[in-house]
Amino acid sequence: MRDQIAQVLANLVGDAEEAVTTLERQLSAIRAKVDALAGELERQRVRVQLHIEERLVDAAGAVAAEELADLRAVEDRLASELLQAQAFSQQLAGFLQLLAVSRQQLSRSKTLPDLDAAKDLLVRQAMVRAQEEERRRLAREIHDGPAQVLANAILTVQYLARLIERGNLSADLLRQELTRIEEALREGLSETRQFMFALQPTTLQQHGLLRTITLYLDTLRRHFPAELTVELPESLPPLTPEQELAAFRVVQEALHNVQRHSHARHCWLTISAHPSEIVIEVTDDGQGFRPEAVVPTSSGGFGLQGMRERAELVGGQLDIQSRPGQGTTIRLRLPLAASVPQEAVQRGGDTAGLGRDG
């Protein structure tokens, strides 16, 4: 009798495993259709964007407000639908991975993951997405920065070598070219150190968020196109290591966006501590954009999504306020633990006196 029950149970486990496998196939087919729909929505959105740009060019910017509003509404609707499709595709991908893990565990140990294990898997997936986007961003920055500097330096050295072979290299020209190479390499070294700091801000563990941001700003100012005004408190209540890292990455990404995209003349970074939360704001007076029309694509858009995910993973909230021609404000709110004593302060009190830094 016991053997019969064990066999029935084994059969039921096998049926469950087969059902999970069938569900995986069905959901994979659905995700493929969702991705195809997202691709079509992206193509339609790009066509509308190009049409708007062509109308503005043809009319020398004097497009009727009603016509422009209608076109913007179509663009926003397509962008919203695209975001929904991409979000659903990501949810399906996460659920498919959970099903795959469940099927494997069911096959090995005849058990299914519990709710905590499922939540942990989803958190890890979000962290991996953020890490992968960070790697892609840094790869683009290295390609456009230090790699380009090195390539130019090599070309200059080859040029000098050809002049030497021809006997056409004067001492003055050699000094000028060597000076140019040295300046370019110093610039590349500075950018490389900035990337190294961005990859692993070890000072977070040693000195805390305020000191780390201060050191980061010291390296950033050399290449920052806007006038940067910084307002920091003398100290902050303690944050968890995860909150400190998330806060630093949000500041880093927000300033990077100002540097690369905003065409701003002024930028303000403000950090303020309140009884229940810490608020970090990065504001610029640049060209602005419409957040609802920004979607993740291969050429960009993941930065905003990555900041939101980082904030959510540590219990925070990220708000983005921007309009074309009206600048941008990115605001991060990080909650403080209710049990934190008021007299406790964060490491990094040596940032006192940095209340304003223009």
Image (cartoon, helix red, strand yellow):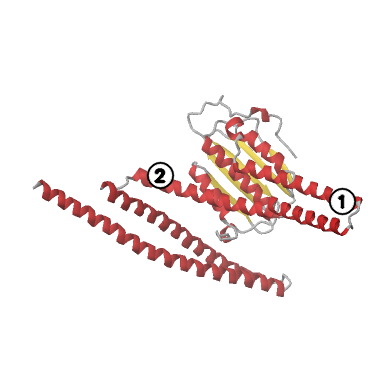
Of residue 166 and residue 192, the one placed in the foreground of this image is 166
Q: Is residue 38 above or below residue 12?
A: below
Which percent across, then down, holds residue 345? 58, 27
Q: Residue at x 71, y 30 (%)?
A: 353
Left or right of residue 167: residue 53: left
Q: Which residue is mark 1?
A: 174
Three-letter code for the amino acid on which mark 1 is drawn:
Leu
Q: Which residue is mark 2?
A: 120
Q: Neighbour class for label 2 at 10 Å: few (<14), some, many (≥20)?
A: few
In terms of secondary structure, where does tag 2 sit? helix
In terms of secondary structure, where does tag 1 sit? helix
In the current view of this chain or complex, which residue is farthest to the top? 343
Left or right of residue 65: residue 102: left
Q: Is residue 306 above or below residue 243?
A: below
Q: Is residue 172 visible?
A: yes
**Picture quarter with the C terminus:** top right
- Quarter of the image for residue 354 reads top right
Q: Residue at x 59, y 45 (%)?
A: 250
